[in-house]
Amino acid sequence: GNSVTQMEGPVTLSEEAFLTINCTYTATGYPSLFWYVQYPGEGLQLLLKATKADDKGSNKGFEATYRKETTSFHLEKGSVQVSDSAVYFCALSTSDYKLSFGAGTTVTVRA
Amino acid sequence: SAVISQKPSRDICQRGTSLTIQCQVDSQVTMMFWYRQQPGQSLTLIATANQGSEATYESGFVIDKFPISRPNLTFSTLTVSNMSPEDSSIYLCSVDWGSDTQYFGPGTRLTVL
C-alpha cells in the first residue's frame, strides 16, 4: 500500500535559519507528491507539488524535488521567518486520486 | 481563485446527538472528499463523496456512522451520527477540479462532551 514517512518534530529554528523536512514514500505506480501547510487554527493549504521524477515544486521560498531513485520529496527553505511557523504535511496521491498523508512536522521559528 | 466554505466552523455537541457539516464550492468540481484530523494527528480519509450515488468509504469508516450526501457538483454534507467524545476532531472537505490536486476547506472543529 501507499505510505508517507515524515521527519518527526517538533523543529525549532531561529529566524533566517535553513529548514529541511525529510519525506520519503512508498507507493505503487507513479505518485504525485505534495506538501501542505497548516497554520495555527486554520485548514490545509497547498504549498507545492510535483508530478513526475526530477520535477521541482516551489512556492513562497520553499522547494522540494521529486527523487524517484531515493523515493524522497524533502522540503527546504533557505531563510525561514516567524510567519513560517506551522505544521507541514507531506502527501502522495496515485491513480485513485486519494491522498495519503505523513504524520506532520511542527515547525516553530523564533525571532 | 475558487472559494471552499464549510459550515459550521466549530461546534460543541452532546454525546448521542448528530451533526451535519456542509461543504460548498463556488464552482463545479470533479471530486469531493471528507477527512478527519484527530487532535494532534495527521489527516485520515473518511470517504469519497460521489455525485448522485453512495459515497465510497475507507476501511474503518461506515455509512451508518458517517452518512454523506453529494446532490450536485458544488455541495456535499457529512453527518457524524450518534457522537461520542472520540469523535472530537477537525473534519475537512477537499475538492479536486480534475488536476490531481486537492484543495481543502477551512475545516469544522467538533468537540463532543
Image (cartoon, rainbow, N blue to C red):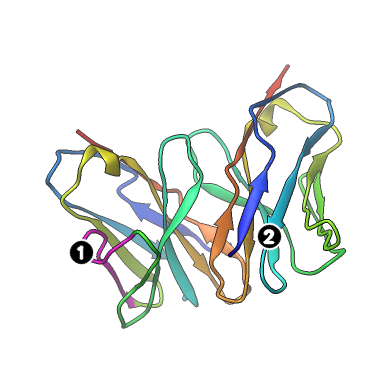
The answer to the question of whether label 2 and label 1 lie on touching residues, with beta carbons closer than 8 A, is: no
Please, which chain is the residue tagged with disc 1 on?
Answer: B
Identify residue type, mark 1.
Asp
Nearest to the eye among marks 2 and 1: give it. Answer: 2
Q: CA distance from mark 2 to mark 1?
A: 32 Å
Q: Give the magenta range.
A: B61-71
Q: Compared to B9, does B44 lie above or below?
A: below
Name the residue that disc number 1 marks. Answer: B64
Q: Compared to A86, does A35 lie above or below?
A: below
Name the residue that disc number 2 marks. Answer: A26
Image quarter of the N terminus of chain B = bottom right
Image spot of residue B108 (x, y percent):
36, 46
Q: Compared to A49, does A94 lie above or below?
A: below
Image quarter of the C terminus of chain B = top left
> Outermost residue toward the bottom?
B52
Task: Tell which of B14 and B73 is nearer to you.
Answer: B14
Image spot of residue B6 (x, y percent):
37, 54
Image spot of residue B101 (x, y percent):
61, 66
Image spot of residue B83 (x, y percent):
19, 46
Residue for point 77% across, 53% down: A73
Please, which chain is the residue tagged with disc 2 on?
Answer: A
